[in-house]
Image (cartoon, rainbow, N blue to C red):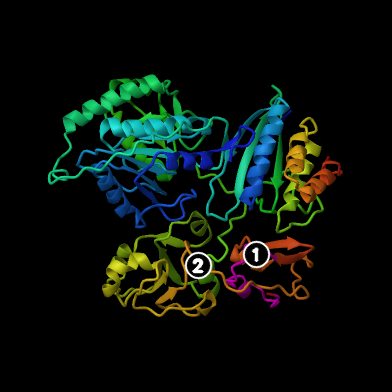
Amino acid sequence: MNYNILFCGLMCKTFDTIMRLMIESARESDYLVTTVTKPLLAPYSVIAAEMRLVGSSKKDITKIVIDYDSVYTGEPVAMHLTPKIMDTDQTDDQCHYWGVIGGLFKIISDISPACITSYLIDKNMNAELAIFKQYTIVSLPFS
Amino acid sequence: MYFMGIINSTESLIEYINGVNFSSVYVEENFPLAISGTFRTQAVNAVQYLLASAVVGNKAIGFFHQIPKISFDRPLRGICIFVSANLPEELETPVFFCRKPENITDIFPRALKTSADTNMPVQVIIAANILNNYMTVPFPTGDLDRVLPYLNNSTFAAKRNIHSTQQKLTAAYTALRTSIPQHEMPENMAFELTSEEFPLYIFPMKIPEQEKLFVKLKNIHTTEKNLYFFHKLIHILHDLDIDLSPDLQNEPLATNVYLCPGCPFAALYANLPLKDVIVFTSVRCEAVKNLYPVEQISITEYMGIVSRKLSVATLFVGNVSEALPVKNILLSNGTFVLMNDCGEKVPFPYISGPTKLKIVRNTVFPYSCKNIKKYSILRNNFKKCVCYKNNTSAECVNGSHCPAMICRENRIHINVKLCTGCRSCVPYCDKKAL
């Protein structure tokens, strides 16, 4: 399958960490990965990056929006992951970012979450790991 | 941070720039790159600063939202690089284009070398896609040489020799073609679309090898604002019949726009009746431009506009540092809100906090975009906070565009790490919850 995943969020540090982990995870699963970033309008503006995963020669592309902070206002997309859809709360320490990204592994089941799990274990981020694991197994409304 | 072989292009670029030992660095206000400049001034003056620095042999680099016109008549002994995220309006110097993250590591070192070889400033245009993107190849180590500046009585009297400049440009182009070969352009070309082809560099003169690249080119697709640049390009390639059509639109934003917490513009628009006022500003901020009807001009231009009393109300928003050279002639016809970025004195009343703005008049705002002050953090009365519970939109979030407000458990929560206590959100809440 081919995927176009738009990531958007406000907290650049966690956003950046997850982007790197996702690129690595997708590459390990033999996807061809390209990233396109959107302009940053102001230092605290929304960071948006599109990750294009090519996994087959078919022309079908599944569009997914990973909307960490409920900031997406573009065209409606069937697979739109927000904290509200994931039934998690936005937190000051960005724990919900890990929950939302957990949902992505539910949609793209051939990408292994091992890279993220091992990163969170390595960094002793137990709360983040718990929420990530919780949402990789949760049932999504559209999955 | 190098992490699993994946490198953030912005971090890597900053690391490279720090490694090159630039003597003069200019970063225009709000340029989206976390690098600090050695000089603060308006973009037009910064060009002269960087060129003069390079004339005596220094390495100089400047980051601009839009590169102003570069006019230089002295040969440079050092390196001078102008970086921008937008296409220039003039084509006076070699221009390098970075549209894909994988090109960035080649382009910057080559731009530096071209500037050294041609004794000319060089422009590097980085597409929006370059910043904050991800790549796997790190930058090569920067050129760590420190060149001692050299100045004598005739340094600034020397004039650029046009004939030798053309020879140097041709030689530099030939050398560049062997190190970064370019392939022929197809019938269509567009800078704004990553799917379309675009050259990696363009030199501002007729070079037969360069012209060969464009022989098949029939159409240039672009947006209205980049027309100037392509007119100049077609002028250089004047033997070719190329259709230039401004048929592209700026891509609509797919997300909400947020300002910085404590943004002075959020405070202005929340506290002042600006509905019938034409607001001018010298502050370059894409988010502000997106959200508010502001016109981008310098303080000098504004003083020209209000040199006679106008029938409409106007307001100029700028920094105190820009007003210092003209503080003795600030005219009574205009109205100024100057943001205190340097602690210097201007003859206007100073206010202690953003909420003290009540009527449109000459004022010094307590801080600028560079030094946003923190006040006591705002609290939310959860009993009164009912917008989300009633499934209505929260005006405090929509009106203030503040990233410190988050929705949790159907209520607005204030992110204490971000909130500066500017209270720009307060006027928008009719429930008095804030």
Picture quadrant of residue B335? bottom left
Q: Is residue B403 left or right of residue B30?
A: right
- The image shows residue B106, relative to residue A81, as above or below, that is above
Distance from the alpha carbon under mark 1 to that under mark 2: 16 Å
Picture quadrant of residue B326? bottom left
- SS at badge 2: helix
Along the viewing direction, whichever of A136 and B25 lies nearer the viewer: B25
Residue under the image location 61 percent in, 70 percent down: B425
Q: Which mark is residue B194?
A: none
Residue under the image location 58 percent in, 56 percent down: B257
Three-letter code, disc 2: Pro
Picture quadrant of residue B433? bottom right
Q: In this picture, which residue range is highlighted in magenta? A: B414-433
Q: Position of residue B163 (x, y in %)?
A: 17, 29
Q: Quadrant of the C terminus of chain B?
A: bottom right
Residue highlighted by disc 1 = B397
